[in-house]
Amino acid sequence: MVPQRYGWQHLTYIFFIVTATIVGLWVAKKYTKSEKAKAIVVRVLSALLLLAVFVNRLSVVYKTNPPEWNWILPDSLCGLNSFVLALAGLCGKKDNSVLHFAWLAGLCGGVIVTIYPDFIGQNPSFMYLPTISGLLHHSLSAVVAIALFVFGHIRISYRKWYCQFWGFVCYLAAGAFFITVMGYGDAYHMVNPVLDNTPLTIWLIAPIFIVLYLSIIFTVEMIRKKKKKMSN
């Protein structure tokens, strides 16, 4: 029987990943006291995310016979963002600008696709590598984004307001390169929407994320000012 969205296999996966995230982050938070230890946790999770992305891309390459190696590079927004978030968490410094862009897309995309994966029925087996690795890299993307805040590896600030804008500019440039130079029919949802029968291409997603990010910055800054005023 082909696995179904919200079938027992999918619901079991959601239960497992949510439980593992809550318990894992709670235990890690309890036993990591130094900044070095917290940074190690973030880097380990980022490395797992990078591994999941790599396995997912390899599985897509080997879906065809002979393998089509041009698919080794992620051509979706979530795939690209998982790759960028993983590298920024693994190799970048604490609170770097790339994290300020990638965490929000990683969190939103990771949660949405974990709950509503449109690729879950591509094979009779739920453990089909493109399926399970796709679910894992989306889920781990959300986990890394949450961990950044749990372990103080990122601090939202109005000084980083430009990160969302320039991040999407880079994604658009990459998508244009894939389409015009490498001959892809679409890349990073510049042509086709994330979900069928919706207007959600990157041209709409980008401004939504920028507005959302600015709203989060404004809210966080207001809360900080209020707390500071109450403490004086």
Image: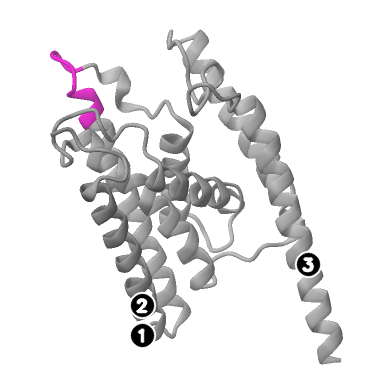
The local crowd at label 2, few if under 14, some if 14 to 19, many if 20 or more residues have their Cα within 10 Å, is some
Residue assigned mark 3:
221
Residue assigned mark 2:
28
Q: Tell me how far mark 3 sits from mark 1, CA to CA.
A: 30 Å
Taking depth in this image into account, of 26 and 86 the one nearest to the observer is 26
Name the kind of residue labelled 2 in the image: Ala
Please tell me in which quadrant of the rendered image residue 59 appears: top left
Mark 3 or mark 2, which is nearer the start of the sequence?
Answer: 2
The part of the chain drawn in magenta is 59-67
Residue assigned mark 1:
31
Please tell me in which quadrant of the rendered image residue 160 appears: bottom right
* Colour logic: one colour
Residue located 31% across and 40% down the image: 5
Name the kind of residue labelled 3 in the image: Glu
Query: Within the magenta stretch, is there residue 57?
Result: no
Decide if residue 24 is on the left or right side of residue 220: left
State yes or no: discs 3 and 1 in contact (Cβ < 8 Å).
Answer: no
Q: Tell me how far mark 2 sits from mark 3, CA to CA.
A: 28 Å
State yes or no: discs 1 and 2 in contact (Cβ < 8 Å).
Answer: yes
Taking depth in this image into account, of 181 and 108 the one nearest to the observer is 108
Q: Whole-percent x and y of residue 131? A: 24, 37
Mark 1 or mark 3, which is nearer the start of the sequence?
Answer: 1
Name the kind of residue labelled 1 in the image: Tyr
Instruction: Kindly state the secondary structure of the residue where label 1 is placed.
Output: helix
Quadrant of the image containing the N terminus: top left
Residue located 38% across and 72% down the image: 25
| Pair 3/1: label in front | 3
Q: Whole-percent x and y of residue 96? A: 58, 56
Q: Whole-percent x and y of residue 105? A: 54, 45
Residue located 33% across and 62% down the image: 44
The local crowd at label 1, few if under 14, some if 14 to 19, many if 20 or more residues have their Cα within 10 Å, is few
Quadrant of the image containing the C terminus: bottom right
